[in-house]
Image (cartoon, rainbow, N blue to C red):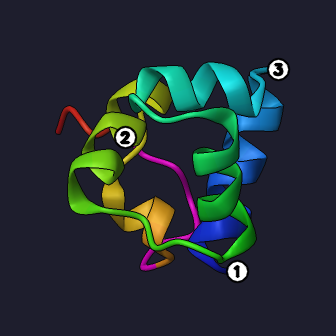
Amino acid sequence: MSYRDRIKGLREDRDLTQAKVGEILNKSQQGYNHIEMGRAELKMDDLVLLCKLYDVSADYIIGLIDSPKSYKR
């Protein structure tokens, strides 16, 4: 599973809109949509914010592990 699928799934599981996540990442809805759709790459700073938002490790988002674990380890 790609990181794009993971961040989309995490967003949908928490009933968040792309606009809301974009706001948290200081991006427009379209800017965040480009990340989910593969038109833009996920930047490291954004990865950190997503880990904090969803309380999951970066390893989970990037696909190194299959079980979400807290980033607070």
Answer left or right for 66 relative to 69.
Answer: right
Q: Could you tell me which quadrant the N terminus lies in?
A: bottom right
Measuring 44% from the left and 22% from the top, which residue is drawn there? 24
Checking the image for residue 38, the label placed there is none
> Could you say whether the residue bearing mark 2 is in a helix, strand or loop?
helix
Question: Could one spot residue 40 in this view of the protein?
Answer: yes
Residue 39's place in the image compared with 55, above or below, is below
Residue 40 percent across, percent down from the top left: 53, 72
> Could you say whether the residue bearing mark 3 is in a helix, strand or loop?
loop
How many residues crowd around disc 2 within 10 Å: few (fewer than 14), some, or many (20 or more)? many
Residue situated in front as seen by the camera: 46 or 57? 46
Question: Could one spot residue 70 in this view of the protein?
Answer: no
- Tell me, yes or no, whether the two marked residues, 3 and 1, touch with CB atoms within 8 Å: no
Identify the image quadrant of residue 22.
top right
Checking the image for residue 51, the label placed there is 2
**Badge nearest the viewer, 3 or 1:** 3
Q: Amino acid at mark 3?
A: Asp
Mark closer to the chain start, 1 or 2: 1
Residue 46's place in the image compared with 54, above or below, is below
Residue 25 percent across, percent down from the top left: 41, 32
Residue 46's place in the image compared with 29, above or below, is below
Checking the image for residue 1, the label placed there is 1
Mark closer to the chain start, 3 or 1: 1
Spatial CA distance of label 3 from label 1 is 20 Å
The magenta stretch is 64-69
